Amino acid sequence: MDTQFAQRRRRDLIMAACLAVVAALVPLFVKDVYVQNIMVLTLMYAALSQSWNILSGYCGQISLGHALYFGLGAYTTALLFTKFGVLPWFGMLAGGAISAVIAMALGYPCFRLRGHYFVIATIVIAEIALVLIQNWDWAGAALGIDIPVRGDSWLKFQFTRSKLPYFYFALALACIAWFVTWWLEDSKWGYWWRAVKDNPDAAESLGVVVFNSKMGAAAVSAFLVAVGGSFYAQFVSYIDPESVMGFQFSLLMALPAVLGGIGTLWGPVLGAVILIPLTELTRSFIGGSGRGVDLIVYGALIVVISLALPRGLVSVFSMLTGRKEAAR
Amino acid sequence: MTAETIIQSLASGLLMGLLYGLIAAGLALIFGLMDVVNFAHGEFLMIAMYATFFLFAFFAIDPLLAAPLVAAALFVFGAVVYLLVVRFAMRAKANAGMVQIFSTFGLAIVMRGLAQFFFTPDYRSVTNSWVGGKTISIAGIYLPEPQLIGAMLSIAAFVALYFFINRTDFGRALEATREDAGAVALVGIDKNRVFALGWGLGAALVGLAGAIMAIFFYIYPDVGASFALIAYVTVALGGFGSVFGAFAGGIIVGLVEASTALILPPSLKSVGIYAVYLLVVFIRPRGLFGSM
């Protein structure tokens, strides 16, 4: 049993390394800026969804308010840079740290809530933060912040001529989020989380510190999502409250994991690789003329996949490999 | 701020709150029946508003007369949604909670897309209806007539719901299925039929609310989203599953919203509702009237 698990983990790691190398080579052959843009977004959502998955998938605390941490990351970086000239790299760490602290501060009262009460609390908290930022004049209120472009440099993490640096950063972020998940899966926390998800009362009685393990998951998850938000602010160089902290974003972050397979290592990656290009393509090809056709396609996909494959798309793969192993 | 303005805004808050209660009643009913939160509830409201609008625009049927028609149409719609989508979501063997959330969420996105496709994203409104834009003065307090009628309708609907649940066979079947769906099957009640009728009834209630809302609110594809969160908060505040908790929750939400608007700038008025929700669940994690 144990060795099989260890084997699987080694296989996962090798596969991830191979995929990362292949992904890194793709821009050498794909020069189209539109396609590169989609690739950056796909990697970003893979990273975000992987981070969301730590709290909501592994630990089972469904958050539909993660836009809060994404927005905090984006705003911390943008404000530090435009108001105080602090480099985005520090902004990124600051945004991550602030988000992790806030996630724990909010977790303190929220983790007593269960089921729908918890889900609604996460939505409501993100919504309060959104309204506050929209009314905060110093931070640009509803108009948002224009990040001044001062030329291409890694130091300022701004690139106007090419999307490639963004691509490689997003790839690195996706790899880090994946690796953190991979590493945590086999740690004490990983086991605790699964126990908490399956049955918190039983876990508690067996000595799992349920509350602390939820707090840990929230902090890691919020930190990584905030780094994603910082990246996004630099990538689009203009942020406003609705576009980085709106409820829509909380959903967009959750969907790749839900479709790919919630609480699994590969689910968020698989979900993002399928969902994001599909969304972007339907939007640009039929969205403009069809008035809402993109929404219909997107929504129908969510309904069909969540009904037909409650374990997500990865379950199709594991079914296939399972059969192969049985045949051997 | 004079006493008069305070009374004035609390009165309109109360009316709006009763209407929030009516919007949320169906959500609470469905949750109580089968532990499912319908994340397309706001979109149910949206199509009810559109139905009212088109009945008015094409057939000159006043929203007040259209309300029963819209409620009947929504009844059918709710039952169909249960039979086509939710029935299958209930069967999920893994991640049941997640499947319920996202299948109804996906449905909400489809409905919004369809509304954009067929009705365009334009804002529409019912103009020159019987009570639209009129106010009535009671003891020096001005009350908008559409909201007043909505509030009375809400009270009537909750009274009817009370008798329906407690005095009719279907109501008893509903209550029995809620308590023990397995045992109910043993006495020959078809669980699926009860659930479908429950969804129909829940949708009919929001249909009624939508017909009234259409009189004084703009109608557009995303209109449901603005009220859905209020409806969830209303239901959770009262305690999930308690239909009459939704009634109390609605009144609280309406009053809190009105008092927040008195103290803070209007753009912050929703913050008060959300803060009260958090305060309540932090003290009572199952809402005000929810069972532990």
Image (cartoon, helix red, strand yellow):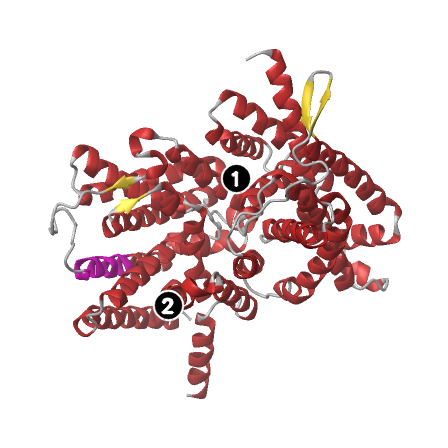
**Disc 1, SS:** loop
- Left or right of A71 in this view: B52: right
Residue drawn 76% across and 51% down?
Answer: B179
Residue bearing the label numbered 1:
A112
Residue A3 sits inside the magenta stretch: no
The N terminus of chain B lies in which quarter of the figure? top right
**Disc 2, SS:** helix
Image location of residue A91, percent across then percent down = 22, 41
Query: Which of these two is toward me, B249 or B113?
Result: B113
Residue drawn 49% across and 32% down?
Answer: B271
Distance in Å between CA atoms under marks 1 and 2:
42 Å
Image location of residue B131, percent across then percent down = 71, 36
Image location of residue B284, percent across then percent down = 60, 33
Say the numbered circle drawn on residue A281. 2
Question: Which is nearer the N-term, disc 1 or disc 2?
Answer: 1
Q: What's the residue type where badge 1 is placed?
A: Arg
CB-based contact (under 8 Å), mark 1 and mark 2: no
Query: Which of these two is toward me, B245 or A107?
Result: B245
The crowding category of the residue bearing disc 2, from other C-alpha atoms within 10 Å (few below 14, some 14 to 19, many at least 20), is: some
B207 w.r.t. B189: above or below: above
Query: Which of these two is toward me, B84 or B265?
Result: B265
A88 w.r.t. B254: above or below: below
Q: Which residues are magenta?
A: A163-176
